[in-house]
Image (cartoon, rainbow, N blue to C red):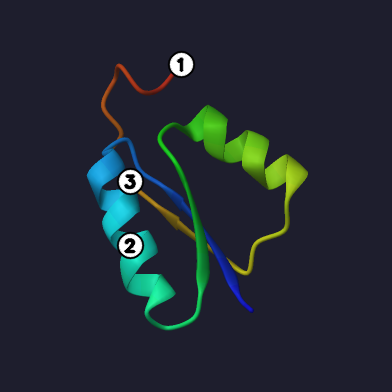
Amino acid sequence: MPTVLIIDDNPSVGTALEVLLSLRAIDAVSATSPEEGLALLQRESFDLLIQDMNFSEETTSG
């Protein structure tokens, strides 16, 4: 089964995408910060990455 990583600082977006993807038999994992997403990428393998391009300044560490 394909697995998708979703990185978005809005948890509602991640949850909505997880639900929509699950309807297509696709596993999805959400992260709410770039750092959390990177940690997941280092531990697991994903077939696709969906990432927010406009993180709020509070979300990023740099």
* Of the pair 54 and 2, the residue shown nearer to us: 2
Q: How far apart are marks 3 and 2 (CA)?
A: 16 Å
Residue beneath disc 3: 53
Q: Which residue is drawn at 27% across and 58% down?
A: 16
Tell me how many marks there are: 3
Residue at 65% over, 34% down: 39
* Residue 20 x, y percent position in the rendering: 32, 71
Instruction: Please report whichever mark, 2 or 1, sits nearer to the chain's N-terminal start.
Output: 2
Return the residue nearer the eye: 35 or 28: 28
Residue at image point 30% right, 16% down: 58
Per the image, the residue denoted by label 1 is: 61
Q: What residue is disc 2 on? A: 17
The spot of residue 62 in percent (x, y) is: 45, 16
Tag 3 and tag 1, C-beta contact below 8 Å? no
Q: Which of marks 2 and 3 precedes in the sequence?
A: 2
- State the quadrant of the N terminus: bottom right
Q: Residue at x 49, y 33 (%)?
A: 34
Towards the viewer: 27 or 32: 27
